[in-house]
Image (cartoon, rainbow, N blue to C red):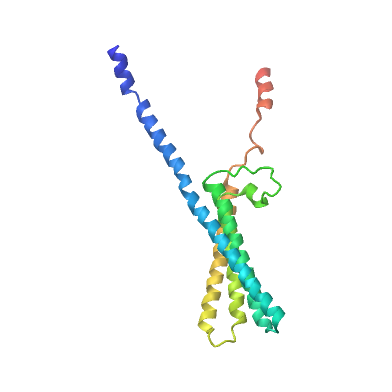
Amino acid sequence: MRLAQLSVADSPAGPRTMLGRVGYVMFLSRWIQVPLYLGLIVAQIVYVWRFMAELLHLAHLGFSGHPPETTVMLIVLGLVDVVMISNLLIMVIIGGYETFVSRLRIEGHPDQPQWLSHVNANVLKVKLAMAIIGISSIHLLQIFINAARPTITDRELIWKTLIHLTFVISALALAAIDRIMENGRPQHGTGGAERPGQLQPERMAA
């Protein structure tokens, strides 16, 4: 009886169980990120409010007078900028939650985003990089439209152009790395591997 108790006490089941519990606690820690995504939803609401305010301002200018075309274009570009930032937030909220926290369980829903069916960390990074390039393009276009103003210097134009090109190069590098990693993954179910249904008759014949 004493030997049985000693063998149970000395068995590695205790440390393994403790490590399993620690791992499960670490796995549960992913829910700590939920307030972050809820905060981004609040930021989305703020951008909707800003969009509506800018839209009312544009409508007031357009119907109450004859504003310069440059002014209207700048306001419209500001609206497009808000929309693109809002799209970026949606990708971070939905894609980040799906990738790092929990499944959304919306398979078969008619409004399920098409890009969500194959999203992973690498795809999400590339999509975010492309969204940042679009936002940077809008800001750069706004700077070019205002280039005639004395407040816009050549140095500012050069630096913002270089920053935009840096974003483009970074996105291309992320896409190339994702392509290399995709080609390096083993292809399941194609060539080489014999299916169990084919292997069994050969064994029976032998």
* Figure quadrant of the C terminus: top right
Q: Position of residue 58 (x, y in %)?
A: 66, 75
Q: Position of residue 97 (x, y in %)?
A: 54, 49
**34 above or below 127?**
above
Q: Note whether 193 is above or below 105 in the view shown.
A: above
Residue positioned 71% across, 47% down in the render: 110
Identity of the residue furthest to the left in this view: 2
Q: Residue at x 45, y 48 (%)?
A: 32
Quadrant assignment for the N terminus? top left
Viewer-proximal residue among 48 and 165: 48
Q: Residue at x 63, y 68 (%)?
A: 52
Labels in figure, total: 0
Q: Residue at x 61, y 60 (%)?
A: 87
Asked whether residue 176 is in view, the answer is no
Q: Nearer the viewer, residue 173 or 121?
A: 121
* Outermost residue, top side: 1
Q: Position of residue 170 (x, y in %)?
A: 54, 63
User: Would residue 78 appear left or right of 31 to someone viewing this image?
Assistant: right
Q: Is residue 14 above or below residue 156?
A: above
User: Can you say whether 119 is above or below 86 in the image?
Assistant: above
Residue 204 visible within the image: yes
When asked about the image quadrant of residue 161, the answer is: bottom right
Residue 163, x across and y down, in percent: 52, 72
